[in-house]
Amino acid sequence: MTIKYLTPYISSEVLIGSVPLGGSNPIRLQSMTNTDTLDTKASVEQCIRIIEAGADYVRLTAQGIKEAENLAVIKKELRRAGFDTPLIADIHFNPAAAEAAARLVEKVRINPGNYVDKRASFEARELTAKEYSEELERIHEKLLPLIKIGSENKTVIRVGINHGSLSDRIMTRYGNTPTGMVASAMEFIRIFRAENFNDLVLSMKSSDTAIMIEATRQLAGMMQQEGVSYPLHLGVTEAGEGQDGRVRSAAGIGALLSEGIGDTIRVSLSESPEAEIPVARKLAEYFPRGISDSKPVPPAFFKSPAVKPEIFKRITGPLVLANMTSFPEINPEAYIDAGFYVNKNTKEIRSSDNSADLIMASGVPKILPPDVSLVLPYKKWFDHIDDQRIFPLFSPETYHENAQRSEKLNLLLTGSHFNIKYLKKPDPGKISVIFTFNPETERYAPDIFINSLAENSLTHNIILNPVFRENDAEDLRIKAAALLGRYLTDRQVSGICLSNIGDISFREVTALAFSILQCTETRITRTMYLSCPTCGRTKFNLQESVKKVKEATGHLKGLKIAVMGCIVNGPGEMAGADYGYVGAAKGKVHIYRGTEPVLKNIPEKDAVEELLKVIEVDNKTRLDILK
């Protein structure tokens, strides 16, 4: 059962060094170093690059006591260089390292899934109520030294839950679910509160945007229910690099920021850490609270749709509609812009996995291939009423009781100033509504529209048509994904029509629409990759490894493949991946099938080939079973 939360979520404030977080403070930006924490010079230099890019906080890994103690040296060198940015220690498995770091830096991040509990074995551990209570007492006892040190040194603690690294105790009772993530967080929150320690920050991380969003919403609701509202750190783990990394992060983080949830963000890209900050800045600036003012996000309108969109039953995910009404002619080049494949020799035009499902045009093109479905204004459609590839687009003037309709699909055009009476008219045949709006000035218009349909018991399919005005492709990626991510993940819409009036090619806009669907996992049209942003634990050149794995597996549509820097985070954080390529030691790689390491310590030069062999054997086995 989903736990409701009040909007906006107004968090309490904590002071991290000299930089306050939460409350009415701006959204804070942060990144994490990928240097060896024992390499003081390299770590200091990278911290400075991250800070100069605009970070409010910098995180460093401290996997052992030596690394934790060297944070003091790094901090001293940064202060000597004139930088007072608060530092955060990232801890896995090692309470002693956390306790050492808590004396030296402003904030420590711990993971309940492995701070006291051993690495999850992914085996069911049925516990009686008494045994469960005893485990919580053991955890409480183990946390006491950290709580004492944190209180004495005014050190903030982030309780960071990772989907995929929950304890066996939690997974047995709740499953590897958002509810399990919340239960894990609340166990630790209650222990800290019992000791009167409230300098806490919470995070719910996953590479799956839907899980990350739902877990964070549930946690916000559960905390409100218990009378607390600690600041929330937002991030999508293993987001990857390039366009998909930005889109996946923007979709997950943006969905929550749009609801007034979130106080600090980290965009995890498999790139240089300082490259994360400009992306995070653009994402934070897109929402009313922004990064410079202190106004909270105004309450928006959030309700689940009355029914799941019907179009989801008809295709493998939301529709992509390409608005080509401004094209003087829809010729072969225009079809390529809409994602279609055109054979250079035969000139044959056929659909691909990334071609628009519907093309909205002002007239019938000279060439209308069998694979193309066309949407025309009603009066022009009427002249081609028998062509099963063409569907009518109605305006309020043409949609009346006597108007002829398609038996297969009818589209209604409306916008933020919609007339509900127009939408209530007789609707034999399938009805979809193209809802056009300005995403800068009418950010929450789709929420008002969706609620109005539900209140009037109308179940039209909705195709959102935000019309952006961007000249920078990265700005468009971030804004479009941040805006649309919530509606897609919540299955509130059955399609998108991404429009842009600006200096970005139509081809790029079409590709972006499919990237948003891919990264929200609402429509998979190619191989999906997860890759961590690297840290001081990374065992190889991650960016180069991602490139090699992509080149070798890009044809494997529908698979989810994770490329992870180390075995500390990798096995847990790649939850949901079909296969994993995980750094084990210098020059060595483990190959995973799901959560199981099937090949260990493979030389890095052979690892991609061995990964392909495992996939090929599995595919052959599946084919044999089908036979």
Image: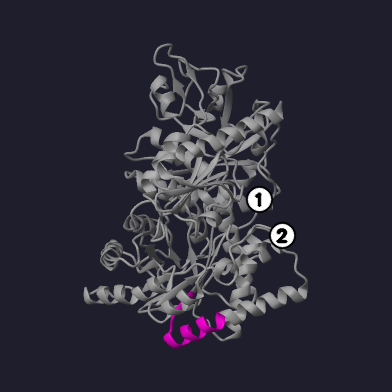
Which image quarter holds the N terminus?
bottom right
Q: Is residue 504 visible?
A: yes
Which residue has dot 2 on it? Answer: 124
Q: Callout 2: helix, strand or loop?
A: loop
| Picture colour scheme | one colour
Q: Residues within 10 Å of mark 2 (few under 14, many from 20)?
A: few
Seen as rendered, the residue at the extreme top is: 346
Q: Callout 1: helix, strand or loop?
A: loop
- Indicate whether 30 appears above or below 394: below
Asked if the residues shown at circle 2 and circle 1 are in contact, with their CB atoms under 8 angstroms apart, the answer is no
Task: Specify the label residue 79 is tagged with.
Answer: none
Q: Residues within 10 Å of mark 1 (few under 14, many from 20)?
A: some
**Residue 273 at what x, y percent from top left?**
34, 57
Q: CA distance from mark 2 to mark 1?
A: 35 Å
**In-image side of 515 versus 211 (left or right):** left
Q: Which residues are magenta?
A: 143-157
Q: Residue at x 58, y 57 (%)?
A: 164
Give, as a three-letter code, the residue at label 1.
Answer: Pro
**Residue 586 at what x, y percent from top left?**
40, 53
Q: Residue at x 48, y 61 (%)?
A: 257
> Is 153 inside the magenta-drawn segment?
yes
In the foreground, 356 or 165 = 165
**Residue 239 at what x, y percent from top left?**
46, 51
Seen as rendered, the residue at the extreme bottom is: 152
Query: In which quarter of the view is residue 312 placed?
Result: top right
Which residue has dot 1 on it? Answer: 305
Q: Is residue 1 visible?
A: no
In the foreground, 400 or 627 = 627
In the foreground, 627 or 22 = 627
In the foreground, 7 or 147 = 147
